Amino acid sequence: MYFIYNVLLYALTPLLIVYFTLKEHSKENITFSQRLGFYRDDQLRLAEQELRIWIHAASVGEVNAIIHFVRLLRRDYPRGWIGISTMTLSGLEMARINLAAADAHFLAPFDLYFAVRRVMKRIRPHLYITVETEIWPNHLQAAKAVGARVLMINGRISGRTVNTYRALRRFFQRVLSSYDFFSMIRTEDGERIKAFGADPKKVLINGNLKFDRLSSDIQEESREEIANSLQLSGVEKIWVAGSTKKGEEELLLHAFQKVKSEFPHLYLMLAPREIHRGDELAELIKTFGYTPLLRTGISTETKLTPDTIVILDTIGELFQVYSLATLTFCGKSLVQLGGQNPLEPAFWGKPVLYGPSMDDFLDAKGLLEEVGAGIPVNNAEELGTRVITLLQDEATLNQRGQAGREMLQKQQGASARTLMLVNKLLPD
């Protein structure tokens, strides 16, 4: 199976290079070279540290999940080298912004044996950490070949991928044998990875790292700062829709039109998952009769009205924008894409609505619905109706949001538990 896997990868490599190069339009000329395992000294910034830890995260969501964990890691290993790799340029940019405690931020190589082996031999990490479900066979094999210990953190297995893993169980059993420990979010995640071939003795349930990160990032004064930067007073009624995908915004705008007939002073802010879609969304918004405004186009001269729909075309601001919301929507859920993490607005005490596709975040969904802070809807029509109902009873709306915030504050501690595993795996 390893042979077949590598043959397929090598056959697809030219297409992958063309795809990522065209998709990313990198101004740093790093896409091609780094994805094949070539790095300048100033990109890896390797020194003579006695301890080296390489953490691999896929994109923005995984990077955000480990912010607090990396802070703790730097506190406990102040002189160690910590490197963060990502698969996407947006993830790389987010890592540079929010994981400044790390020594290096770089794009991970494709899972090509020659490329991965070259990087592993150069870095020679003592510990190689993968975040969530970044399971790359050649990365893992190369890490073990240079003597690294291997750890999965914040592990989760979505219901959508269960059948794929089961069909390839024999292959994944061998792949997963490279891990020393699996730190999973939920009991269900632990049972699934054991079913795919993980050694049960290596599987632990430690909760979601993102609970710790979000709680530590809540700063009430930042609410006033973000309001001022958006030219808002802070008292407006605002619906914030985060991490939306193509095909979903049109459904949201239909729902928004319905709500506006009852609440004409309600504002809408859209945060597309891909920020480069700003101009595309602006054209869509115009067809509904509203005025689009890119976040990057807001200045001190800007005047917002309830018929202005702000498009957040920036990275790293959505979490703070949630602080201004009256209520929120969690994207990738009205389309069949598995949803997004609804915890960010919930930590600000904001109720979260989402569509029927939340398979990738069932743990967070369950926690929020338990206290009424998570509100599922089946379609855009129901979404509009539910928003109207919630806005008609603002006291209950606020109670729902506060209940979610209080519940999440009780879920902290995953970062400390995960750090204990790191301490077990690293040399004294």
Image (spheres, grey):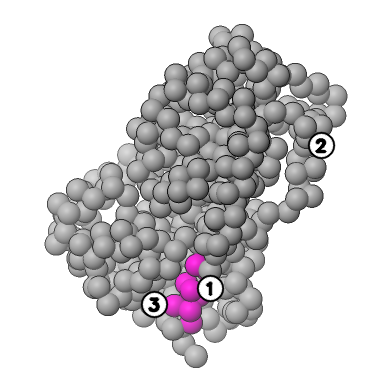
Q: Earlier in the sequence, mark 3 or mark 1?
A: 3
The answer for how far apart the CA atoms under marks 2 and 1 are is 36 Å
419 falls in the magenta region: yes
Q: What is the crowding at mark 2: few (fewer than 14 residues within 10 Å), some, or many (at least 20)?
A: few
Q: Which residue is mark 2?
A: 228
From which residue to which does the magenta span run?
414-423
Above or below for 235 versus 57: above
What residue is at 65 percent from the left and 60 percent from the top? 216
Q: Image point 14% across, 52% down: which residue?
A: 167
The answer to whether 331 is drawn above or below residue 64 in the figure is above
Point out the image quarter for the N terminus: bottom left
Measuring from the top left, give residue 243's x and y in whole percent.
52, 37
* Callout 1 amino acid: Ala
Spatial CA span between label 3 and label 2 = 48 Å
**Mark 3 sits on what residue?**
148
Image quadrant where residue 182 sits? bottom left
Q: Is 17 left or right of 263, judged from the image as shown?
A: left
Mark 3–mark 1 distance (CA, rounded to whole Å): 22 Å
**Mark on residue 251?**
none
Q: Is residue 388 above or below residue 289?
A: below
Where 108 sits versus 308, above or below?
A: below
Q: Describe the element under mark 3 as helix, strand or loop.
A: loop
